Image (spheres, rainbow, N blue to C red):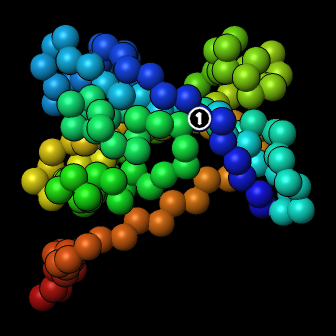
């Protein structure tokens, strides 16, 4: 498959809701703080397609403005947020995901070219550093019409072995 994105960047108040909670709260920011937002409409098409035209998702990435204001994140080009955050001394070490299916809003149906009654998958992902400091909130709206979502979760470092219970012995 071939992918492309239309990206815009804005500075906004951190009170914007993501799955019912202000993004500033998710980032551990003080009330009245600002966030840098990278908004993307993502498109997917066949491998030979130079310019895919089918929008498949909406993706907003929120960062603490004071942390990233002077970085490449503040421009709409294709970049690696992970590399930029690591370069600032905040390498990502984990994610907390919240996922819910729901009916698409009128605006989401318009942008994603969905039918009048359509289901989307909404994802809120909070990325954090080793000390659990949140430095990025990703909010995605994905098409639900026949899409298959596959997750692979890796663990860095030591992961405790799972406990097992033994069956009781019969006498």
Residue located beneath label 1 in the image: 7
Quarter of the image for residue 46 reads bottom right
Counting other residues with Cα less than 10 Å from the Cα at mark 1, is it few (<14), some (14-19), or many (20 or more)?
A: some
Q: Is residue 20 above or below residue 167?
A: above
The furthest residue to the right: 48
Q: Quadrant of the N terminus?
A: bottom right
Residue at the spot x=82%, y=39% of the render?
Answer: 54
Q: Position of residue 10 (x, y in %)?
A: 44, 22
The furthest residue to the front: 70
In the rendered structure, the answer to whether residue 63 lies left or right of residue 45 reads left
Q: Position of residue 159 (x, y in %)?
A: 20, 75
Q: Position of residue 78 (x, y in %)?
A: 55, 49
In the rendered structure, the answer to whether residue 148 lies left or right of residue 162 reads right
Q: Is residue 110 above or below residue 26?
A: above
Q: Position of residue 100 (x, y in %)?
A: 49, 33
Quarter of the image for residue 89 reads bottom left
Q: Quadrant of the C terminus?
A: bottom left
């Amino acid at each position: 498959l071939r992918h492309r994105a239309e990206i815009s960047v804005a500075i906004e108040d951190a009170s914007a809701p993501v799955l019912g909670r202000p993004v500033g709260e998710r980032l551990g920011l003080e009330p009245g703080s600002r966030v840098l937002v990278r908004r993307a409409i993502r498109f997917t098409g066949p491998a030979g397609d130079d310019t895919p035209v089918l929008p498949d998702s909406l993706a907003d990435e929120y960062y603490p403005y004071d942390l990233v204001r002077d970085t490449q994140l503040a421009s709409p080009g294709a970049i690696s947020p992970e590399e930029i955050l690591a370069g600032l001394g905040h390498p990502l070490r984990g994610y907390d995901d919240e996922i819910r299916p729901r009916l698409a809003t009128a605006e989401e149906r318009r942008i994603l070219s969905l039918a009048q009654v359509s289901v989307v998958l909404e994802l809120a992902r909070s990325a954090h550093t080793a000390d659990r400091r949140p430095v990025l909130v990703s909010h995605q709206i994905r098409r639900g019409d026949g899409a298959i979502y596959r997750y692979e979760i890796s663990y860095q470092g030591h992961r405790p072995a799972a406990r097992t219970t033994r069956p009781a012995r019969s006498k």
